[in-house]
Image (cartoon, helix red, strand yellow):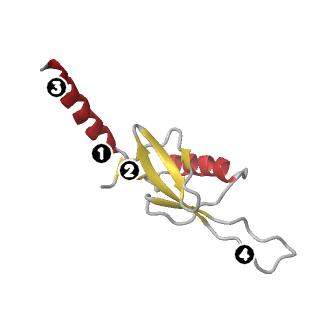
Amino acid sequence: MKRALILVALSLSACQTLAADGKAAVDMTDARTRAQVAEALARAVGRAHVELGPSDGTVVTVLPPPIGPYETNSPAMPIRFDIEKRGEACVAVRHDAGRAYPLPGVTCAPTG
């Protein structure tokens, strides 16, 4: 009987933990949050600085670097990151590669 109760308690707590994981949103209107996201995504793409595109907080895009003085156009495309909550942490998941990057110091809220 004790084992059954323990198994039920463990399975219920596991369901609650998994339910909190998934799609999330960050407040990109907050300057501090926006700066922290930009810093984390700059590391993710291997650049010193990045410019972020418009965002609804659930998807963040890193814009390509500006073209140089001897270029007329560039094939570079924005890089899309989906925001997710994993446990207590917020992560940015690179849409094209599926790799997750931590967003230290950033608070996010589940969206669904």
Residue 19 is labelled as: 1
Q: According to the image, label 3 marks what residue?
A: 4
Q: Secondary structure at mark 2?
A: strand
Mark 3 vs mark 2, CA separation in Å: 29 Å
Q: Nearer the viewer, mark 3 or mark 1?
A: 3
- Callout 2 crowding tier (Cα within 10 Å): few <14, some 14–19, many ≥20: some
Q: Nearer the viewer, mark 3 or mark 4?
A: 3
Q: Is residue 61 above or below residue 1?
A: below
At x 39% / y 52%, what residue is drawn?
24
Mark 4 vs mark 2, CA separation in Å: 32 Å
Between discs 3 and 1, the one toward the N terminus:
3
For the N terminus, give its image quadrant: top left
Q: Is residue 89 above or below residue 95?
A: above
In the rendered structure, are the residues bearing label 2 and label 1 in contact, judged by CB atoms less than 8 Å apart? yes
Residue 75 is labelled as: 4
Q: According to the image, label 2 marks what residue?
A: 22
Residue 10 is labelled as: none
Q: Nearer the viewer, mark 4 or mark 1?
A: 1
